[in-house]
Amino acid sequence: MHRLSPALLWCLLFGNAVIGFGVLMVPGSLNDISHNLDVSISAAGGLITAGSILMCLSAPVFASVLGTYDRRKLLALVMLWYGVMHAVCLVMPDFEHILWFRVIAMVAPAIFTPQAAACIGQLAEPQARGRAITFIFLGWSISSVIGMPIAAWLSEVYGWRSVFGLLSVLSAISAAWVWGVLPSKIAPPVMTMSAWRETFSTKPLVLTLLVTVISASGQFFLTAYFAPYFKLTLLTTPEQLGLLLGWFGACGLFGNVMLSRHVDRFGADKAVTFSLLLISVSMVGWSLGSNFYLAFLVLTPWGLGMFASNSAQQARLIHIEPKLSAGSVALNTSSMYLGQAVGSAGGGWLIAQGHMDQLHWFAFGGVVLAIATSLLAARATRRFTKFQ
C-alpha cells in the first residue's frame, strides 16, 4: 500500500502552484494583452471566460472517462500539455488563434487539480485528510503571492509572451517532478453512472457545490479585472501593481496556512463560512481604497479568505462522502470555473457599459448569497452525517 510522503505532498503543491499561475496570469497580463493584440479589455477578458467554460465542462467528464488510468502518467502528461500549448501561443499571429490554443491548454487545470485532490483523498488517513488536501492547495495561494504579481510586472515590462514562456518552463519542471515522485498504479475509484446519480442526489454535496459557483461568480466580477481596475483608478505603475497583487497573494497564503493547520479541528463548514465573511468585508469597504496605500488595507480580508475558502470547500466535499470524492472534487473544480466564467463575463459587460466603479457591489451580492448557501449546506451536512 502506498504511503502519503512529504515529497509527494510538495510535488502536488508545486503542480497546483503552476496550474494556479497559468489561470491567474491572464488577469495580471490583461493590460499588455489588450494593448499588444489591439483588443479591448472586455474582449481580452474572453481569455478568462472561454478557458473557464472549458474547464467547467471538462472536469467531471474526465473524472469518468479517465477511469482507472494511472494517475502518475496522467498528471505528468497534463502538465506537459499545459506547457506545450502555452508555448504554441507564443508564435500565434493574432488574438483569435491565441484564444483557441489557450482554451485547449486549460484542459490541464480541469484534470490536475481535482485528480491531485482525489489522489490525496485516497492515500491520506481520514484524520489527516483535510490538512493534506488544504496543504497541496497552498500551491494556489503561492501562485497568487509570486505568480500573479510576477505576471503583472513581466507583462508590463517585457510583454505577455514572457509570462506565457515562463509558464511553459514551469509546467515542464512540474511534469518531470510528478513522474519522479508519484507512485505508479494510483487510481481513485471510478465514477460510474450510479456514483454520479448518488452525487447529484446527495443534498449536502449539491449545496456545497452551489456555494463554490456563487462565491466564484461574485468574486470574479472584480478579480478578473484587478490589473486594468487599479491602473485606471489608482494610476498604478507596474511595480505598484505587482506589490498590490503580491500583498493580496501573501494574505491568501497566510490564510491558507492557518486553514491547513486548524481545519480538522474547527471543521470545514465553519472555515468556509468564516472565509466568505472575510471576503465580504473587503467588498463592503472597497470604495475606501481610494489610493495606493489604502488599497492594501482593503485587499487584506479578501486575500485572507479567498484561497482558504477554496481549500476548505475541497476538504468539505471529501468529508461529506469520501467514496464520491473523485466526482465531487471534479464538480467543485467545474463549479469554480463556471463561477469564474460567469463573473468575468459579467464584469466585462459592466466595463463595456462604463460601470467599472460598480464591480465590487456585484461581487458583494454574490458573496452574501454564497454565505447564506454555505449555512444551508452546513445544516444539510449535519443531518446527512447523523444518519450515516
Image (tube, rainbow, N blue to C red):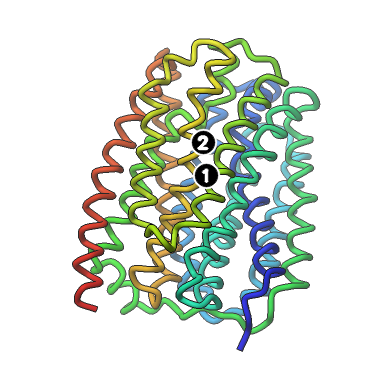
**Residue 241: x and y, percent?**
65, 22
Quarter of the view holding residue 368: top left
26 displayed left or right of 320: right
x, y (%) of residue 156? 73, 23
Q: Residues within 10 Å of mark 2 (few under 14, many from 20)?
A: many
Q: Secondary structure at mark 2?
A: helix
Q: Is residue 138 above or below residue 148?
A: below
Which quadrant is home to the N terminus?
A: bottom right
What is the x, y in percent for residue 277? 35, 38
Quadrant assignment, res 144? top right
Drawn side of residue 362 relative to residue 237, left or right:
left
Q: Against 147, is 173 above or below? A: below
Circle 1 SS class: helix
Residue at 45 percent across and 26 percent down: it is: 348
Q: Residue at x 50, y 72 (%)?
A: 121
Q: Is 94 in front, or is 218?
A: 218
Against 311, residue 3 (above or below) is below
Q: Which is more foreground, mark 1 or mark 2?
A: 1
Nearer-N-terminus badge (1/2): 1
Label 1 packing within 10 angstroms: few (<14), some (14-19), many (20+): many
Q: Where is the C terminus found, in terms of image quarters?
A: bottom left
Q: Does the image show residue 367?
A: yes
Q: Residue 255, which numbered label?
A: 1
Q: Is residue 57 visible?
A: no
Inspect the image, locate mark 2, and give the three-letter code of the amino acid beneath it.
Gly
Instruction: Name which quarter of the figure residue 232 lies in.
Output: top right
- Indicate left or right for 300 with 184 as reference: left
Which residue was labeled with disc 2?
303
Name the amino acid type tagged 1: Gly
Q: CA distance from mark 1 to mark 2?
A: 7 Å
